[in-house]
Image (cartoon, rainbow, N blue to C red):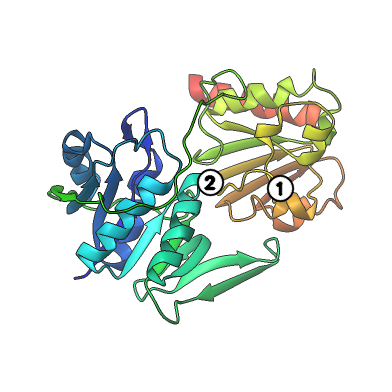
Amino acid sequence: MSQVLVLVELAGGKPAESTRELLAAAAVLGEPAAVVASGSAKELAAELGRLGAETVYASSAEGADSLLVTPQVAALAAAVEAAQPSAVIVGSSPDSREAGARLAVRVGGAYQSDVIGLEADGTVAQQAFGGAFNITASAAKGIPVISLRSNSIDGAAAAASGTLVQLDVSGDTAPTTEIVSRHQQTAASERPSLKAANIVVSGGRGLGSKEKFVLVEELADLLGAALGASRAAVDAGYCEHNLQVGQTGTTVSPNLYIAVGISGAIQHLAGMQSSKTIVAINKDENSPIFDIADFGIVGDLFTVVPQFMDAVKARKNG
């Protein structure tokens, strides 16, 4: 069975939450193998093995944590040369997408972006034209380099050995950009990350004000969900820009998406319509959001949401 390489992003020195899903996706296509651009790979190998990586390819390039993308590209390129994989899978973060695209150019691969499903024969599912069409595609030539949207693959890869293989990237002299500093846009939140969350609760212009947007925050916290918003709510100043879900914001694909007071503009639908289950709450029965919702509630959100929260609390306490 040929290997399928997975680029591992690190968060606080540990594999990011997306790693388990990426390795599960790799198991659909072949034998999962992880690629890490970090000097602490020995400590990571055992954990990556538990997540399903049979082999862990690691480079220890100087400045891996302070250079933008290029150390990851160098590690991927060296791993491709060593393993001759049938495919490479990266995540959907900006850094992973860029690393995947650069790798595809280097190795003459076929870059497939924003993939929402894949089959054992290498066929992938994608959305096009703002989510208006679902398409299937396969690479005509070259190694497929697949950028997978979060929460697109269920299950996990079987635990494996995590055998460590060191890569030599000393001859890789690609131009580099140094990260001088990092600034977090808003205060740290205890809520799940919007892109990786299993449940997302989003509020729209129907909330009416920043003060009333708190109702959506309370519902998100009650469900242990990530908080999102429509562009209209962001533009109106109800919440921070980094909460925007949509074509010009964050694309999400949670198991449950709850849209509160969101009419369903096409750019918003493009960013969330691949969610497994969609619940819409809106007083306008003709809102486009109901066209894609699995469950729709027509009513005043200021009446419906408190009743919904009471029911959830009663279930939790019962």
> Vertical placement of 41 versus 23: above or below?
above
Q: Quadrant of the N terminus?
A: bottom left
Disc 2 crowd rating (10 Å Cα; few below 14, some 14-19, many 20+) is few
Q: Residue sitting at 45 percent across and 66 percent down?
A: 105
Query: At which x and y percent is residue 4?
Result: 28, 63
Query: At which x and y percent is residue 95?
Result: 48, 45
Total numbered badges shown on the rendered structure = 2
Of the numbered discs 1 and 2, the one sitting upstream in the chain is 2
Q: Is residue 113 left or right of residue 128?
A: left
Q: Residue furthest bottom?
A: 140
Q: Observer-nearest residue: 157 or 257?
A: 157
Residue that numbered label 1 is attached to: 248
Residue that numbered label 2 is attached to: 94
- Residue 88 in view: yes
Residue type for callout 1: Thr
Q: Is residue 141 left or right of residue 172?
A: right
Q: Secondary structure at mark 1?
A: loop
Q: Observer-nearest residue: 3 or 263?
A: 3
Query: At which x and y percent is residue 280?
Result: 72, 44
